[in-house]
Image (tube, helix red, strand yellow):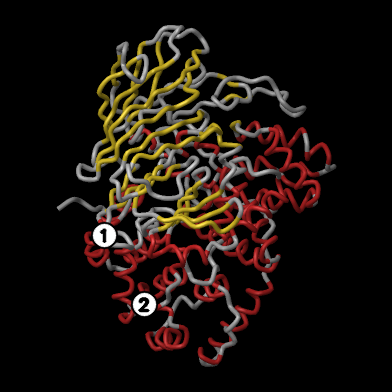
Amino acid sequence: MIFAPVLGALILLGCNGQPKEKDSPQDDYKMEFNDVHTFAKPAEAAITHLDLDIKVDFEHKQITGTATYDLENKTGTNKIYFDTRDLNIKRVGTDKNFSGELTWKLGDEVEFLGRPLEVDITPETKVVAIEFATNPGAEALQWLNPVQTAGKVHPFLFTQSQAILARTWIPIQDGPGIRFTYNATVQVPKELLAVMSAENPREKNDTGIYTFKMDQPIPAYLMALSVGDLAFQSVGEHTGVYAEPSMLERSVYEFGEMEDMLVAAENLYGKYRWDQYDLIVLPPSFPFGGMENPRLTFATPTILAGDRSLTSLVAHELAHSWSGNLVTNATWDDFWLNEGFTVYFERRIMEAISGRSYSEMLALLGYQDLQETVADLGADNPDTDLKLALTGRNPDDGMTDIAYEKGYCLLRLMEETAGREKFDAFLKDYFNSNAFKVMTTEAFIKHVENTLFKDVPGMAEKIRINDWVYSPGIPDNVSVPVSDRFTKVDEALAAWQNGTAAKDLATTEWTTHEWLHFIRHLPAELTSAQLAQLDAAFGFTQSGNKEILAAWFMHTIRHQYKPADDALEAFLVSVGRRKFLKPLYKQLLDHGQKARALEIYTKARPNYHSVSTNTMDEMLEWKQG
């Protein structure tokens, strides 16, 4: 199989992927990496700015328009390469008016990667314009009918570009190590509002034409667009919420702490570099909890619990404004540098907002998730290394709890070994000195060796960083979180198992996280009578909290608790978040209910984004018709 061309050796990349002189004392080493998931050769010729002019056509489920790029030809090459997948390329020219035509061709299809667009240029070529059209099945795009929205009147569109799906809706250099600024003009139906990962409008206009500006350079996976019947409301000086009108009041209440989170984040690790931090609540088919698109986090409505108990997800996406968006993994093999840092930062934000006892519940639940993931994958599986090996694979394969929770555990160990004051100073300097650059795992290790390990005697031997990064499983020096609040939950659970009626347990002050710990640690074997008692006391089957519902359904599926069957089906048909779908469908398969799983999936599949259907099709061996 042929894979993408290999990138050359690079030295601490600047904002558009060009080699840059070292900016800080620790940057005295070369950063070399190979991005096997892009056809682009940015060491030769790279995009630096995108001017996007597109029309969104709901009737034909198509985006059409022109992408015009400013170029930097670093080596005098006569070719530049773009990533495309399932795109219709119409023509390529020397400017957005196509006053001069350029010769181009599409290469052979490569699994996961699509087709390279090879454009002939000269060393003097400064601009390349590409006219294109998407296909209705473009994997980044989800076109929703009115009945799939909260308002039930207007259609809705959203994109999901991470990891390498930007190339399915824009011809682009689609690697996390390639940054560019952008402007956009987007034409949509007049009754709808368009928003992007950029400076956004706050209300609809009479033309249906909206303009956008993103002055900070971003990689392609952070390109984002959403179009729908949307309204906006501020929740703070630099924060606000977009949602469908019927969802706005509820959403504004749920995310009322966003400004406090932003202040807490800045107090920890320095100034927020993206000017405004807004959030859009998408329809329930969105496949992730959230996506950290700069200036506009995309969020699932499954975190609207009514009590702000699930908003640590907002803290997570906000933290990405530093780890990921500001300092970015150079390749998808280095994904843990985005997510491990972000989980650590998220929990520090939540500690500042809600206290240490609260953040430790999050940490312990995360550690439980990590243990389960390692058990599922196998403790010797190289996919449990922090540094991944994704050549020839879809980068989505690396988006597991390993990057998130094992990465967090390493950083937590580093903090506890160095001391919080030194570790905070280290992280703040790391974000500032590497702002708008990329980072490899190897460069990070070298940076740690040149800073923390030199400052703290014996730290290198205590951490054993290579064991964490390049070895599978969970190292034996892991720092396991401890939660006093969960100890009380364990006591309540023991009392119930010893005969105390569920309704008599002291649960009135419990948060979502205590309930999750309780449900996760119910006995493996339960009778229908026990499930019914718990359900009568706590209303699990009818809970409006999607996290609690998903955890409860794991037990009802295992024990074929019939009173929950309709609620389970309704949940799976309406919710497209992959985090919930994968374990629930797997539980159905593991307990002899494949026919039922397929029956539900056939109904639900039209409501899921391709990110979810790609995973579920394979798991369920689903075939059209």
* Left or right, 328 with reference to 548: right
Circle 2 or circle 1, nearest the eye: 1
Quadrant in the rendering for residue 554: bottom left
Which residue is painted at 45% across and 53% down in the image?
A: 280
Observer-nearest of 203 and 557: 203
- Circle 1: residue type: Val
Residue at the farthest left position? 625
**Residue 137 drawn at (x, y percent):** 25, 42
* Left or right, 485 with reference to 163: right
**Residue 494 drawn at (x, y percent):** 58, 84
Circles 2, 1 touching at the beta carbon (< 8 Å): no
- Circle 2: residue type: His
**Residue 71 drawn at (x, y percent):** 47, 18
Quadrant in the rendering for residue 29: top right
Q: Which residue is mark 1?
A: 153
Q: Which residue is mark 2?
A: 559
Residue 502, relative to residue 568: is it above or below? below
Quadrant where the image shows the N terminus: top left
**Residue 570 drawn at (x, y percent):** 30, 70
* Left or right, 540 with reference to 485: left
